[in-house]
Every structure is written in C-alpha cells, then in structure tokens.
Image (spheres, rainbow, N blue to C red):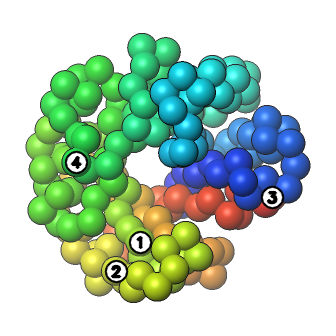
Amino acid sequence: MLEIAVTNRYLCKDDYFTQIAKVASHKPYAILLREKDLDYDKYVALSSKVKRICDEAGTRMIAHTHASPAFDSLHVPFALASEQLAREFALSVSVHSAEEAIKAEAIGAKLVIAGHIFETGCKPGLSPRGLAFLEEICRAVRIPVFAIGGIRAENMQLCAAAGAAGVCRMSYWMEL
C-alpha cells in the first residue's frame, strides 16, 4: 500500500531536518510538507531544505497550499483547487465528499486525499467519516484516493479493502 508521510514539525522527537532525512530514507510514496502555520516566505525557505533532502533520497516532496515555481507537486484544500494549478503542478486535493472528488478529478487533480476516516487527535471532537465514506470516494473517481485521519498499521488494510490506493500518516512518520 502506498503511503504519504505528512509533516508536522511540532511532533518531531528529533531535529526536524534529521527527521525528514530519516523519513525520506524509508522511501514513502511522498512527503507532504504540511507546515500550515508558516507564511509563504517561511514556508518556501523551509521547503527548499526539505526538497533538497527529498531529492537526495529519491523521494517526492509535495508542497502544501503554497505554490512556487520551485515545486512540481502541490496539495491544496478543495476550495483552492483549480484547473490552472492542475496545469502547473502534479495536483492533489483534500476532499470531504464524492462530489468534491469528482470535481477535483475533472479539473485535472492527479490524486485526492479523503478524510478523516478514523478518530484522530488532530480533529478532537469531530466524528470520523468512516470506511463507507472512503469507499464512496473510491468508487466515484478513477484517480488514486489516499485515506487520511487516524491511520494506523492495524487499520491500513481496511482502507485498502475500501479501495484506497494509499494512506497518509503524520504521527507515525514524525515520531519514527
């Protein structure tokens, strides 16, 4: 099963760049540089170092939200997805309904990330959408669907059985 490692520098037990190098050495499908609290300039500065580490390890880096000519892959929330971005980048889009997934595919997204599937500390008090939701998304589109939210080793196969091409995990990779 394919896996996207999602970053969160606040979860790292080690130096951030050391952790990124460790993650990249395991060759996940990609590293999604999610550091959403950074403004554009700080994000681009951080991303240039992360991109270098990923390139050296032969691991793809997906930028999150901040578009820059230095990136070739970009992930955005559904509200920011556009045909223009899909022409400029290998675009992935966060979706929360089959309708959003269909629209993301129609504008040229290369993959969608659907969630949150299971209970997660990242979304306290918010009910997970569950496996039936994931299966609905997977049936609605032809592009790869990655599950996110509360993904652990013991439930990854449930995501695959629902049709997901892969999963996204944050805590596992940041605490590796």
Which one is earlier in the sequence, the residue at label 4 or at label 1?
A: 4
Give the residue pinned by disc 3: 176
Give the residue pinned by disc 2: 129
Q: Label 2's element?
A: loop
- Mark 3 near mark 2, Cβ–Cβ under 8 Å? no
107 sits to left or right of 59: left
Residue at (74%, 40%) from the top-left corner?
A: 20
Gap between marks 2 and 4, in whole Å? 19 Å
Gap between marks 3 and 2, in whole Å? 27 Å
Which one is earlier in the sequence, the residue at label 1 or at label 3?
A: 1
State the mark number for residue 79: 4
Residue 40 x/y as whole percent: 48, 27
Gap between marks 4 and 1, in whole Å? 17 Å
Amino acid tagged 4: Ala
Gap between marks 1 and 2, in whole Å? 6 Å
Residue 176 visible in the picture: yes
Amino acid tagged 2: Arg
Give the residue pinned by disc 1: 116
86 sits to left or right of 42: left
- Mark 1 near mark 2, Cβ–Cβ under 8 Å? yes
Q: Label 1's element?
A: loop
Which one is earlier in the sequence, the residue at label 2 or at label 4?
A: 4
Q: Quadrant of the C terminus?
A: bottom right
Q: Is residue 130 above or below residue 65?
A: below
Residue 101 x/y as whole percent: 20, 57
